[in-house]
Image: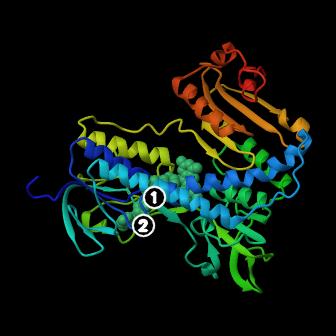
Amino acid sequence: MSDYDFDLFVIGGGSGGVRAARVAAQHGAKVALAEEDRIGGTCVIRGCVPKKLLVYASRFAESFEDAIGFGWTTERVAFDWPTLIANKDVEIERLSKTYVRTLEAAGVDIFRARAELENGNTVKIANGHRFRARFILIATGARPLIPQHLPGRDLVITSNQAFHLEQLPRRIAIVGGGYIAVEFAGIFAALGVETILIYRGEQILRGFDAELRHALAGEMKKKGVEIMTKADVNAIERSGDGVRLTLTDGRAVGSSSVMYAVGRIPNTSDLGLDKAKVELTPHAAVKVDAYSQSSASNIYAIGDVTNRRNLTPVAIREGHAFADTVFGNRKTAVDHENVPSAVFSQPELGTVGLTEEEARKRIDKVAVYKTNFRPMKHTLSGRDERTLMKLIVDGLTDKVVGCHMLGEGASEMTQILAILVKMGATKADFDATVALHPTAAEELVTLRD
Ligand SMILES: Cc1cc2nc3c(=O)[nH]c(=O)nc-3n(C[C@H](O)[C@H](O)[C@H](O)COP(=O)(O)OP(=O)(O)OC[C@H]3O[C@@H](n4cnc5c(N)ncnc54)[C@H](O)[C@@H]3O)c2cc1C
């Protein structure tokens, strides 16, 4: 080691950084990790986990309504937001401590401080200490974007604050059309908040299968979410005890609160990356190759800071692959194809592989199999909600190249479907599988048109 304090210095203790640090240490490296906030990062502290807990909480609202058709009496049902937030915080704290224990057990030195590069091998942490490391891993994630010059930007909350509201607002305007905006719209609306989604594009969830985007927007509207598309915000001002949003077309929207979910920017500023000659992409992400190596040969970057597929399991894979490549003597690149993902909207949406639109651009002969039905549960609940399932098949090879679904259980089904897509299962394989009755998933093996 001689010249170096550490073999590896990881900056950022989120999904990717923690995995990389642990695996590198298990490969025998002397590892340090600096985290300026709580260990666990976005996913655990202010992303996937607290979000899913809020989604669970909000879904009870419909379950109580649906139960009536099955003979239940549900009077005196009440919801208390502060109780939910307090219980959620206890769980997040438990998880964060688990991550710390995992790192400590692997022998990783943890610095609870902000870190930046002083040069290609030196990391300076907030208390002024400097450490020399043979390799440096940038795993600093990303943060919510609020447009720099938006008048009234100080009145805006993001998902970070949404997890800590003292009380639910009476009305909320959510600006954005991506999965975070859509998920929070579902949470707030189900919990009784008047919710309006303002999105500048043609339809919510750009990049997802067009038919599902459209169907989800329809279902959300049925649940009371007001969706304004092709609408953008010009300015926000205080108005009474709430806010007033002026749109670019001159319309005004009043609300108790306004949340921005218009995208996330990689945490690359003030990190000293220029001093280490680490190149960035035009979107301020760290530019990396297939092995997550940056333009500086001993500096790697993984996860959201590289803006590849910004999902927790991808950051974890990239962290693991980095550790195996650099310290495990096993050069590993992460395959970013056929990564499944879900939108925990209401109803939820699951997707893996090519959308119909992508398939039609890339494949000569595309076959689309789909079904749109009322789930059995809603025959008695009386709820007007439909499930949509779609298989995209390469008509020449018969391979299933995309699966998309909207409806209860979509995320769970999509995880399993992702295995089939990854394995190269054909439509004939689906057809040869006997249905499991009565389920929604059985529709996937009985699609004939
Ligand atoms: C609301 C929300 C919901 C989400 N839901 C899902 C979901 O359902 N499924 C899914 O797969 N993904 C989801 N994501 C995305 C997921 O959280 C990220 O893809 C994932 O956390 C990325 O991991 P990471 O390690 O790259 O970065 P992060 O988890 O963001 O970790 C980076 C860490 O670096 C720290 N840091 C930054 N700069 C410094 C510095 N200079 N010094 C020290 N520490 C620093 C930060 O404090 C942070 O803890 C969601 C994200 C959000 C915001």
The residue under the point 10% across, 58% down is: 3
Horizontal side of 2 relative to 332 (left or right) equals: left
Quarter where residue 125 is shown: bottom left
Instruction: Please determine whether, in this image, residue 340 is positioned above or below residue 303.
Output: above
**CA–CA distance between discs 1 and 2?**
8 Å
**What's the coloring here?**
rainbow
Q: Is residue 203 visible?
A: no
Q: Give the number of the disc on residue 41.
A: 1
Q: Residue furthest top?
A: 432
**Residue 171, percent across and down?**
78, 71
Instruction: Please determine whether, in this image, residue 351 is positioned above or below residue 366.
Output: below
The residue under the point 56% across, 62% down is: 89
Instruction: Please determine whether, in this image, residue 424 is positioned above or below residue 256.
Output: above
Quarter where residue 414 is shown: top right
Q: Classify mark 2 as within 8 Å of ligand 1 or not, answering yes or no.
A: yes
Specify the quadrant that holds the C terminus.
top right
Q: How many marks?
A: 2
Residue occupied by mark 2: 37
**Kind of residue at disc 1:** Gly
Q: Are marks 1 and 2 in contact (CB under 8 Å)?
A: yes
Disc 2 packing (10 Å; few <14; some 14–19; many ≥20)? some
Q: Give the number of the disc on residue 298.
A: none
Secondary element at tag 2 = loop
Disc 1 packing (10 Å; few <14; some 14–19; many ≥20)? many
Q: Is residue 115 visible?
A: yes
**Residue 265, percent across and down?**
49, 63
